[in-house]
Amino acid sequence: MNYIAYTQYLDTFKKLLEKEGFRLDGFQETIANIRNSQDLKYTVKPIKLVMRGKFPKRLSHIGVKALELEFDMNVNGNFQDAVSGKDPFSSYVLNIVMYGLDDTNMLYNAMHLDRHDGSASGNSVHPYYHFHFGGNKLTAQVENYGQILILDSPRLMYHPMDFILAVDFIVSNFVPESWNNLRKDSNYISILQKAQKLFIEPYFKSLANFFDKSPSLWNHQELYPQLV
């Protein structure tokens, strides 16, 4: 795959999401930026989704209504590294913020997937790609602890995701009705398979190589610090 084909997949993916009712204002500009830079350097401005149905379950507050989710991305990487099976990103952040409303408060929860910058992290476990609950997007919104939808906050290792994989992750977890509809479209499945092969397969191959004592293009200790 080359970057031209990748931007074509992004354009088709955008149309599939819009067909399902999602608004991706400004994302055409993101696709154009990727096409112009010929690389994995792009910003996705905040995209808002209405979380329909009864998801997510087991919220810490009773009577939550008007639940919405907003996400944005900022990534800097090398497309050829992705094609070669190397770590594709030099910097990466995916922010996910959830907004709710009960009888008295606006409620917030936030998580982010980011890439560790390699600086010292003390004694804490710091996988290079990890989900972290809370963080800057939460503290910027919350004025008192009664507004927080509570979740535990470890750094959970996870594979890197481009826009395609990030949207599939969010929709599958928070808008499952739309996810089920999208997965009925063969174009959606085909695009997802290509993104998984580009960004997920090398990640897990590198971890498997650790157990096989095989050479790897990724540093397993950075991906999974607990491996010994």
Image (cartoon, grey):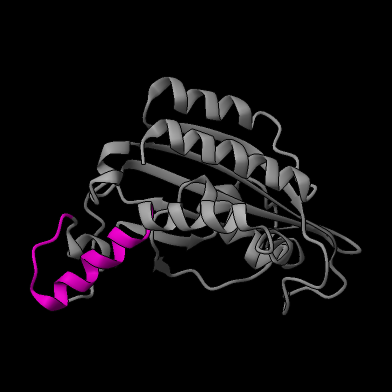
- Quarter of the picture containing the N terminus is top left
Residue 227, percent across and down? 19, 75
Residue 20, percent across and down? 77, 51
Image: magenta residue range: 199-217
The overriding secondary structure of the stretch rendered in magenta is: helix
Residue 69, percent across and down? 71, 53
- Quarter of the picture containing the C terminus is bottom left
Of the pair 118 and 183, the residue shown nearer to us: 183
In the rendered image of this protein, does residue 159 appear above or below residue 91? below
Q: Could you tell me if residue 185 is visible in this image?
A: yes
The residue depicted at 69 percent of the width and 63 percent of the height is 184
Task: Indicate whether residue 33 is drawn in magenta.
Answer: no
Across the whole image, how many numbered discs are drawn on residues? 0
Toward which corner of the image does residue 45 lie, by quadrant? top right
Of the pair 130 and 212, the residue shown nearer to us: 212
The residue depicted at 12 percent of the width and 77 percent of the height is 212
In the rendered image of this protein, does residue 5 appear above or below residue 226? above
Q: Could you tell me if residue 135 is visible in this image?
A: no
Residue 209, percent across and down? 16, 70
The residue depicted at 45 percent of the width and 52 percent of the height is 195
